[in-house]
Image (cartoon, rainbow, N blue to C red):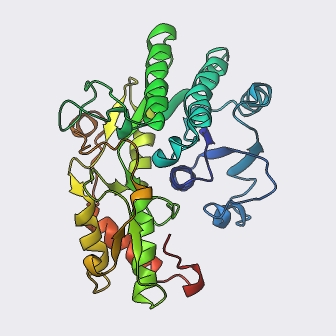
Amino acid sequence: MTTALITGITGQDGSYLTELLIGKGYAVHGVVRRSSIIDRQRIDHLTRDPAIYHKQLFLHYCDLNDITTLRRILNKVQPDEFYHLAGQSHVGLSFEIPESTCEFTAMATLRILEVLRDMDQVPRFLTTGSSEIFGAAAESPQTEWTAMRPTSPYGVAKSFAVNITRVYREAFGMFACTAICYNHESERRSPNFVTRKISRAVAAIAAGGVETLKLGNLDVWRDWGYAPEYVDAMWRMLQADQPEDLIVATGILTSLEQFLDAAFAHAGLSWRDHVEIDQRLIRPSEPQRLVGDPSRAARTIGWHARTSAVELARKLVTADRLLPEQELVAV
């Protein structure tokens, strides 16, 4: 039985990756933080299944700045694969908490790599990058060789993580790589991300609960994909003969207005009747057009995105319209 260890197992990507690996017969170990509030709803269906929990799925308490505990877990588990998915992942929030964003997104990656390279049997390692590393990109679409020009603390932290992973790969011969993931959303995305904020608002408006959705800059273009497909790319990267960083994206540029059109139209509404611009929600610096070139991922690991941004918008609205009305809050 192949063994994997995942940080960020309770997050969107971590939960989908866990399902994927369990389906492939893996033993999956997840690192979770001990806190006064236990929020594991994305993996509750797995931890409540006696055929899975403590048989294929195991959870361990550890903060990523606690190197001693992390080393102890690694020595006990001896994973074949290590997926580092944890970190502060909200771009807008990174302007308000830049130090903790860099601590948990950049420095945690370095700490993990340091522990891994001292192991007798070094597991294959993957961390996630972001389109935000390119920020004010000088070319479009962006490739694995596009210069990094981040425009947010989050983008800077991810740039560090991508580069330090490459350095450890080249300097120490580790199987270490980065999935440079462009925006990928799902029904498990937190409502404080704009795509889910939109879909929840559409559901609430359609149900007659609210009338207005407040957003910031609408002149934003992104490469939006579907998260379950992106974790498949992560797994494929660790099965490759050689480690390399790859762009994981749809290759299709979609504007926020187009996403709004698709989401509201799916409920028979027009976003122009309900969306208001709130200047407080406009970020200090905002990349305008980020779209990835996924051709190398197609050639090397046979991966292709299948869900478009328009299809994604419809998926999210469909899911949110099934939620109880008391959960439908337009942020």
Residue at horizontal 40%, vertical 78%?
212
**Farthest residue in the left direction?**
140
Residue 136, by quadrant, is top left
Task: Using residue 66 as the reference point, say whether residue 315 is left or right of it.
Answer: left
Above or below, comparing residue 257 to residue 166 in the picture: below
Q: Is residue 128 visible?
A: no
Identify the residue at the far right of this view: 36
The residue furthest top is 171
Residue 135 higher or lower than 204, as above or below: above
- Answer yes or no: is residue 119 visible: yes
Residue 323 sits above or below residue 63 on the image: below
- Location of the N terminus by quadrant is top right
Q: Nearer the viewer, residue 213 or 91?
A: 213
Q: How many marks?
A: 0
Q: Residue 320: where, in percent of width, then height? A: 46, 77
Residue lying furthest front in this view? 279
**Residue drawn at point x = 53 percent, y = 61 percent:** 190
Choose top left, top right, bottom left or bottom right for residue 77: top right
Does residue 296 lie above or below 200 as drawn?
above
Residue at (57%, 50%) from the top-left corner? 25
Residue shown at 61% from the left, 34% from the top:
104
**Where is residue 146 shown, x and y percent of the image?**
25, 26
Near-viewer residue (35 or 76): 35
Residue 92 location in percent, x, y? 47, 48
Question: 248 or 36, which lies in front?
Answer: 36
Residue 213 percent across, percent down from the top left? 40, 73
Left/right placement of residue 152 relative to residue 29 reads left
